[in-house]
Structures are given as structure tokens and as C-alpha cells.
Image (cartoon, rainbow, N blue to C red):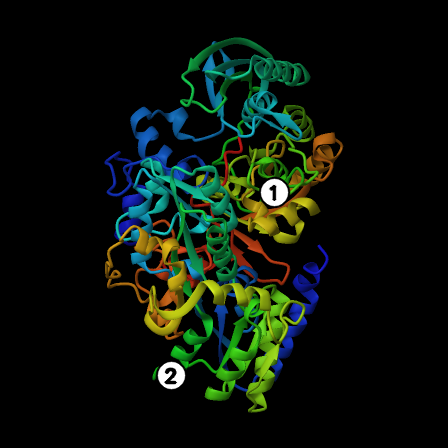
Amino acid sequence: MKYLDEYRNARIARALAAEIVQRSTRPWVLMEICGGQTHTIMRYGLDELLTGAVELVHGPGCPVCVTPLETIDRALALASRPDVILVSYGDMLRVPGSKSDLFRAKAEGGDVRIAYSPTEAVKIARANPDRQVVFLAIGFETTAPANAMAAWQAKNEGLRNLSLLVSHVLVPPAIRALMVSKTNRVQGFIAPGHVCTVMGCREYEDLVRDFRVPIVIGGFEPVDVLEAILMLVKQLEAKAARLENQYARSVNYAGNLAAQQIMLEVFEVADQKWRGIGSIPQSGLRLRAEYAAYDAGKLFELEDVSVDEPAECISALILQGLRKPTDCAAFAMRCTPENPLGAPMVSSEGACAAYYHYRRNLVAP
Amino acid sequence: MPASKSIAELTCPTPLPAKDTVLLGHGSGGKLSAALVRDIFLPALHNPVLARLDDQAIVNVGGQRLAFTTDSFVVQPLFFPGGDIGSLAVHGTVNDLAMGGATPLFLSAAFIIEEGFPISQLRQIATSMNRAAAAARVEVVTGDTKVVEKGKGDGVFITTTGIGLVPDGLILSADQARAGDKVILSGTIGDHGIAILAQRAGLEFETTIESDSAALHTLVAQMLSASREIRCMRDPTRGGLSSALNELAQQSGVGIEVDESSIPVREEVRGACELLGLDPLYVANEGKLVAIVAPGVAADILRAMRSHPLASDARIIGTVKKENAGLVTMRTPLGTTRIVDMLGGDQLPRIC
């Protein structure tokens, strides 16, 4: 596949890894934000190639993982109502809430449907005028524009039976929260290429300036990730702190203005809870007042519930790079993808799940 | 090992908390399906033949070694590029017999038909079954039909059962793999699953990929004529190549190491998987087999396979190891190693 195979080329990847190792005078601690990048690192064993030169810390960029338990519980409550069709991205279905998950809700008779795009929820709403269609609108800045579009279309068409259960998170406030933390160890960030394709580069320039930390916007294939790491190592060795764009084949400075416009039209920035981390100020999106009629939370008068995570889960430490998944006593024993105790094990893009799927043979039994 | 591991190994069918309903994922051919067999069916129906968990049972009847198997087909859509539920129901059962080294002889076919199903489509399915059976030189000699109320089925479900004969002295079983053995794959993976997915409503892309649905027993016969030192075979259907290899590793108590760059995947399948976020290792096949063979005969068997039209792309993809018992590991093109895990469950449409 053109534009993909080049970025999986083993010879180029090995050469990049060798240069990273050769240039590093000490083990730099770098964080990849996006779960897709974590997946690539584990799938191709990139960390194995960089042992001693770079320590990779896996960031909070798996949207499924960081969706609060409360949101899942609210989706489950909606799915159990006979008048509701709950539409969701497929990978949300196996994420456990505090008591059940959407697969189980579906098995128990709930009308839960998988969509590849939120516009499918609009189609379902048109086709089922006598039912309430709720779309579980989760994700980072990457899914927000399409989710906003579904609400905008519904409003524009006067559809009265479509609403959104929103749990949107934003990347820059999460990086900010990590950088101000007293225990932070991260010395450079690989910023998520797809988020920047939508949002552009400016927000990351602010972070570089405020914290004097190098950031490289990176892609998702092994050569992308290694090239981004090399760019960070070069900066760190030169004591520089700049924003650089490794993923220039997709990301431009301004980003996708049409996508940003529809997001702004429908959503506004708000405080947001992250599963495994806690509340981060101004780190999420909610529907604007003009879209209140499309807010499933308001429409169905869903209660504000608060749920505690299992005490044994050390996800907050893992998502800050203070511990590795394999350091956790519950890893691969009491905590597995089938029975996850916490956020990073719930989706295949979470750090703990990536270690489980690709590396659990390295844990001593 | 911790308590959770030992609980998983118990065979008492005590219901586990929060697992009181059957999920779609229990039919995925992955970990959940395995749990259903292990926790419900094995304890309830236990006998030594069933406990081998092969694709077919091999029993002695009047001095003959009889292979016996059954399979249900619930594929949607019923008609797809490269086949339909009728031909699939013949191929699937013939292949389950062939994986035990049996020559398939007779099939039965049971139909559960939903009220309102068009007779013309039923005729089309029956004709297709006949064509597939004739090509495979087996006969459908008995059958049954049931009709359920509208809404209580999904068009038509078919169950086929097959019997065949296994040559004397030939033992192909999932527990026979030994360190040093070679792993051979008969061709490209993922064709069937992607052909089905591409047809599904809601997935709006078009491909030219056809299902690989085919009867494999003549290929198996050709392999056995090259050497009888085949340890075990599987047709990697639901759950894909990954599940088949994991089952073999677990039942033989060995590690299997495969080389990622040696596994053939069609360009269109790779593209579709990229788009849908799937890994071809987990996508279903209906006309492929994976064989574990003694190291000394691997080249001979490979040559025999490549001269058969269904395995011209056959290649050695890996080696059986003592290390990492029960796990499948993969050498990546970068020279690193990772686990190839069994699928937990799935959210994909029914594919066989």
C-alpha cells in the first residue's frame, strides 16, 4: 500500500533506531500521547530496539480508556430503556461500567447498535421516528467534528429524536496537567498526529513555550514513531525546546478549519473527568446551550452519579509514567482485558492492554 | 500462580458472577467460545473423545476408524462473492473431517428456515450445496427441515454433519506438535472474512475480494501422499489464523513462533483491514489450512501442497518451540518479538 509500506520499512526503522541509540547520551524519558502510537510501539517492539537510550511512557490518549465509568453507566441506563436505540462506536461496547457493559445490555434485549460514523446515527433516527436515538459521542478532537456534525444535522433537519451523550476530551490540557504535576518525569512529547490534523499546531506551541519542553507531532507507523523520537532526542541533546512536525503529510499549521468551525458551533470547552486520572480543568467539550435539546444528559434527566475505581488499579501512576503496566501486582492476573480493573486495560489501545496482548510472557509467573 | 489462574482451570460448571448471559462474543471462536466449551459443555458431556477438542471426533466402529463432525452455519449475508451459505455448509464440514486426515463420505443437512423466506432463494442454496458436494465427491444422504415464526430466525440456518474414514495408523490431533516441528500455511489469510464484511449493509466500501470457501480434503490427501509425518492440522475459520495457532500451542503445550513477513495477505485484504481497524490474523478463512509437520518432511509436504491449485501460495511460516509454552509469538519485520494473542470476543458480523 502506497504511503503506508514506506512507513513500515524494516531497514529504515532499524537505521532510525540505531541513530537514536547512538545519539542518546543518557536515557531520555519521552511520552507518546496517543493510544494508536502506544499500540504501534508494542506491536513492532520499538521500545525493545531503544532499550537504554529512551524510556517510553505511555500517555492518556486512548479515548475509550479515559471515558469515565459514570458515562458508561449512563449509556447502560439509556440502553435498557425500550424507547431508546443506543448507537456507539464498536470498541465502547465491551468497556465495563460499574456493573455491566453494552454487550451485556444488548444480550439482555437493549437496542444497541454499532456505527462506524455518527452520521449513521442520524440515518437511524430518520428511519425510526417513533424511537429516541442516542449517540454515545466520545473521543478526542479527532472524533469531535464528526460528532458535532451529527448534532448540527439533527438541528438543521429538525430531527427531534436524536441526542448525544457527550464525553469529549482534549489533548493540550492533559499535557499541561502532566507538566505541572510535581512527580512529572517526562522530558519530551510525541503529540498525536490525527488530533493535530484537525486542530493544527498552535496549541502545542503554547505548551513548548510555557514549559520549555520539546514536542514533535508524530504519525502512527513504526517509521513515523521512530523518526519523531529521533527528532526529540536531537532537540534534547542540543538542549533545545521546539515544536516540530514529523507528520507533515497530514498535519498543517492551521489544521482543518472547517472541522474546527463545526466543533465550535456545537461544543464549548468545559471541565472534564478522565477515567484513571481524575478531573482536569477545561479539558473536555460539552454541547452549547443552543444544542440543549440534543443533549441526552438533559433530555433523559440522567442523574449525576459518582463511581469509585477499584483501589488496586494503579492507572494514574501508569498514565504519568511513574510505573509500567508490568509493575502492577494485578497485571495479567486479577486484571485482564476480559476483566479489566481500570482504564488502561479496557481498550486494545490502552497501555496495559497493549502490554497484555504483546508482552505478557515477559512477566515472571 | 495466583488464584485467578487456578479458577480458570477448574472444570466445575458453577456459574461465575456477572457472566450469566450468552453474548455475541461467545460465538466468535476466540477466548469466550473456548470458555463456553470448557465451562459448560465439557463438564456436562465429558468423555475422552470430546476432551481432545479436535475439529472432528475419531471413533472405532467395527474395526474402521470413523471421523465424525458437525457444524452450524449462520452467515449473513446468505449470498456473498465466492459462495453462499449452501456451499459454505458443505465445505466447512468436509474440511473439519479433512483436518483429521479423513476421506469425507456422507453428509447430513438440517435447515432452520424463517417464515417468509423466498422459496427461490432456498432452491438456489440447495442447488449450490449439491454442486459443492458433487465437486467434493460427497453426498448429502439425510436431512431435516424446521420452520420458525417470522422474527425467530434470520432467513436460514444450516447444520451439516459429516462422516468419513481415517486411514489406519494416521493420528492427527491438536496435542501432537513437538519442539522443532515446522508450521505450514496453505495460502493468503483473511479473504473470506473481508469478502463477507464488504457485503454487509452499513459498511460502504466495495472490493473485488472473493471468499476462499473450498473443500480441502484433496489437498490433505496430496500432503499425506508426500509424508504421513503430519502432526496436526486446522482450518483457521472463525477467530482466524491466530486462534488456530493458539489452540494448537495450548493443546500441545508448546510455543509456536511465526515470522510475520512470511504470512501472505492479499493487497486488497490488507487495505480493507487497515480501513476497518482489523488484523488479518483474526479474520476468518474458509479454504485454508495450517499444518504442523515434522521438520525433516516439511520441504516435501510444502512441494506437494504447492502443486495443488488450492495451495499454490503455501509457505512455512514458523517453528514449534519449547519456550513460551501455550503461547504464539511472532518475529516482526524489525527483528523484535511479540505475542499473537487469541481474540477475546468480537464485534464483527457473523461470518460462518
Tell me which amino acid carries mark 2. Val
The numbered dot on residue B148 is: none
Instruction: Mark 2: give few (<14), some (14-19) or many (20+) Cα within 10 Å.
Output: few
Where residue B327 appears, as percent x and y from the top left, is 47, 49
Q: Which circle, 2 or 1, is nearer the viewer?
A: 1
Residue B346 showing in the rendered view: no
Tell me which amino acid carries mark 1. Glu
The numbered dot on residue A180 is: 2
Closest to the observer: A83 or B152? A83
- Is B149 left or right of B287, judged from the image as shown? left
Q: How many discs appear?
A: 2
Q: Is residue A157 above or below residue A358?
A: above
Residue matched to label 1 = B204
Residue A264 showing in the rendered view: yes
Element on which disc 2 rests: helix
User: Which quadrant of the view contains residue A255?
Assistant: bottom right
* Contact (Cβ within 8 Å) of mark 2 with mark 1: no
Instruction: Mark 1: give few (<14), some (14-19) or many (20+) Cα within 10 Å.
Output: few
- Is A309 left or right of B105, judged from the image as shown? left
Measured in 3D between alpha carbons, the distance from the residue under mark 2 to the one under mark 1, in whole angstroms, is: 45 Å
User: Which quadrant of the view contains residue A274?
Assistant: bottom left
- Is B123 left or right of B255, judged from the image as shown? right
Q: Is residue B19 above or below residue A73?
A: above
- Is A169 left or right of A341, judged from the image as shown? right
Chain of the residue where label 2 is placed in the rendered structure = A
Closest to the observer: A356 or A207? A207
Q: Is residue B218 above or below residue B288?
A: above
Where residue A162 appears, as percent x and y from the top left, is 42, 48
Instruction: Say which residue appears at 47% left-offset and 59% top-offset.
Output: A349
